[in-house]
Amino acid sequence: MKIEIENIKEVLVAGSYISDEDIKNAEALVKAGGVTFIDALLRNGVVNNDIVGQAIAESYKVPYSDLNSAAITPDQVRKIPEEAAKKLRVVLFTEDEKELTVTTDNPTTAGLEGEIEKIFPGKKIKITYSLAEDIESMFIHYEKPLDTRFSKIIEESERVAPEILEEIFDDAITYKASDIHFEPQAVTVLIRFRVDGVLHEAGRLPKEYYENVLNRIKVKSALRIDEHYAAQDGSLHYEHKGIAVDMRTSIIPIVEGEKVVLRVLGSYVQGLTFNDLGLTQQNQDLLREASEKPFGMILVVGPTGSGKTTTLYSLLKMLNTPDTNITTIEDPVEYKVQGLNQIQVNLATGLTFVRGLRSVVRQDPDIILVGEIRDLETAEISVNAALTGHLLLSTFHANDAATAVPRLLDMGIEPFLLSSTMNIIIAQRLVRKICDHCKHSVVKNPSDFDTPQLKGVAKYLPGKDITLYEGKKCEACGFTGYKGRTSIYEVIRVTPTLQELLVKRPSAQEIWIQARKEGAKSVFEDGIEKVKSGLTTIEELVRIAPPPDLILREDDVKDKVTTSKSVSKAVKKNKK
């Protein structure tokens, strides 16, 4: 299928989606190599997948069908025989007694309408366009369960390991899994996918075939196949059916063998914007303001898998212009982006965060991204880089934004240096979104929150009859009630008042009290707003970010300040 790029440009310009400047920037990325014009627009954050889909559909002069927002069931997909569907690249979108709509990624396929009429005689046929990756994702409904496919491969194939891995990888990509787990047990190897933050069993592999699969993973990840008793880390690249994905490999020895976890590094980040991440307009403005400063530090904190790197890369996309020099040093490089100078940490050659960062600073880039601040030396070089004319972005492990400062001070960073360099601290978590296909409203009373799991929630949702939302658990969301994830944030902007406080080595609570006075909201409070707006459920929010034991409202802050002053006066009086 050949898409006329000039036609798409005309459509996007006519719809005011892109400007001449956007076209120039995208063409510069294309000229640099490795990306298409559409990929360049996505990477620059100018358009998203839906806008691209609509533009391509208009260039074909057919409507656009968004398969991601439609409740397409397996039975509906299978109404078109598998052979015909894959040959014609077509999916049944809607159907009633008189007509039906099919969607394809190539509406110009010769004989398409005639072939569909043979399958559905007597019905009026309407043809629409959908993105190729969305069409491909619908074909999963023709597949038999993984266990059945494993049995067939074992019976019929001579090359068992490659074909088994292909089936696992294809399913993981289709279901948008973030992790693939291989867990050896007594007789079988359990294979699980983490989808939207929750693990689901995908299949079981007879254990006698696991060694070959394990060795193939090791070879593709450039790891030692003769090492069975030490942890190993690496990465692999997978390409199949036009899909290219990078994965991060982690292998650890357990009692029953070697457990493998593959972190799928999704290319979807190329199309993400701040709105997609779940940042409120106020937090977007704060982050943009911090990123426009010529130097200083932007720190994102949270546990592993909370989306910290994705947030920073979405910010880098906005900052990545032809006149800006951006260098990253990461372990590993999770997202490869055209226009960035990306350095992979390599312990075997002595290229550590510290050594790499020292060399990077000597080259004087405008913006530096440090994958993670792990030790004092990395922290010191990062702070000094932020102090000497560089904008530095990094991640850090801390429970919340206020806790990050005492942790850095405990590592040995001087308070006055931290006060001079820190622009903004962001804490984040990921929560599952309610499935759009089965979302419905429910009326809750305070008594509904009187459970051990929801203890302390009622004070955040005052009132007698509160309208919230939840999923009915349909086929589209795998009967979970959730589909996709969004972030909840806690943002502390380091104001002059907070800078003065940082010099005094404050506790996390003192920092939070001052941040609250200046308008900061906790991760839980940001989540409560998303609960009220129908993005997620209160149960999901409490699972990820329980309510704090102490609610520091404005009155609480005043009380604490008053109490602190009273204590100080009493101490002085006693000394006299």
Image (cartoon, rainbow, N blue to C red):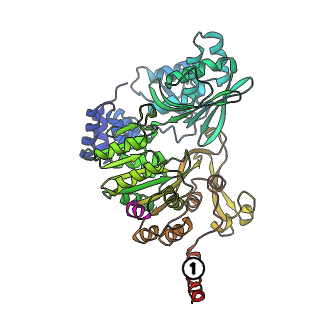
Which quarter of the figure has residue 296?
bottom left
- In the picture, measured across the screen, residue 470 lies left or right of residue 414, that is right
Residue 190 visible to an observer of this rendering? yes
**Magenta stretch: helix, strand or loop mostly:** helix
Which quarter of the figure has residue 12?
top left
| Residue 228 percent across, percent down from the top left | 62, 24
On screen, residue 162 above or below 496? above
On screen, residue 168 above or below 306? above
Residue 102 visible to an observer of this rendering? no
| Residue 566 percent across, percent down from the top left | 58, 84
Magenta region includes residue 436: no
On screen, residue 554 above or below 358? below
Q: How many marks?
A: 1
Q: Nearer the viewer, residue 381 or 306?
A: 381
| Residue 94 percent across, percent down from the top left | 54, 35
Residue ID at (43%, 39%): 352
Q: Nearer the viewer, residue 483 or 399?
A: 399
Q: Which residues are magenta?
A: 414-422
**Which residue is disc 1 drawn over?**
564
Q: Amino acid at mark 1?
A: Ser
Q: Residues within 10 Å of mark 1 (few under 14, many from 20)?
A: few
Which secondary structure lies at badge 1?
Answer: helix
On screen, residue 34 above or below 359? above
- In the picture, measured across the screen, residue 353 lies left or right of residue 164, that is left
